[in-house]
Amino acid sequence: MRSRYSAFVKLNEPYLLRTWHPNTRPAQLKLDPGMRWTGLEILATTDGSAFHSTGTVTFRASFRGGSLHERSRFERVEGAWVYVNGEFLD
């Protein structure tokens, strides 16, 4: 989760696509170079240890003028954790 947040901050589209589940990965991303991310707060996690194949991360990512509150699902694909999808919260 933290590495993907950093990739959004740095507009690192190749990394974001590489860490996205192949079944839900878009063909490309349209990242906004004007977006100024200001912080990441991990609020909760479930599963996601070395003994799990799935997990969730609930977080709040702040940006200039607001924040994004999401519960993201991750799965292991060929040993690597990848983002599957997310549910926006309040």
Image (spheres, rainbow, N blue to C red):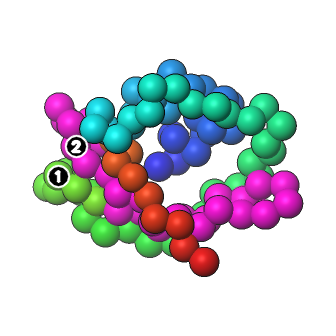
- The disc at residue 23 is none
The reply to whether dot 2 and dot 1 touch (C-beta < 8 Å) is: yes
Q: Quadrant of residue 5?
A: top right
Q: CA distance from mark 2 to mark 1?
A: 5 Å
For marks 2 and 1 on the same chain, the one whose residue lies earlier in the sequence: 1
Is 63 within the magenta? yes
Quadrant (top left, top right, bottom left, bottom right) of the C terminus: bottom right
**Residue shown at the point (78%, 32%) measured from the top left:** 33
Which residue matches tag 1? 53
Q: Let me know if residue 15 appears in the view.
A: no
Q: Is residue 51 covered in magenta?
A: no
**Picture quadrant where residue 63 is located:** bottom right
Name the residue beneath numbered marker 2: 76
Which range is magenta?
56-81
Q: Amino acid at mark 2?
A: Arg
Q: Residue at x 51, y 40 (%)?
A: 3
Q: Position of residue 56 (x, y in %)?
A: 35, 62
Q: Amino acid at mark 1?
A: Ser
Q: Which residue is pictured at 68% across the width and 38% down the height?
A: 9
Crowding at label 2, few (<14), some or many (≥20) Cα neighbours within 10 Å?
A: some
- Where does the image place residue 35, in percent across and percent down from the top left? 79, 42
Disc 1 secondary structure class: loop
Where residue 76 sits, quadrant-wise, is: top left
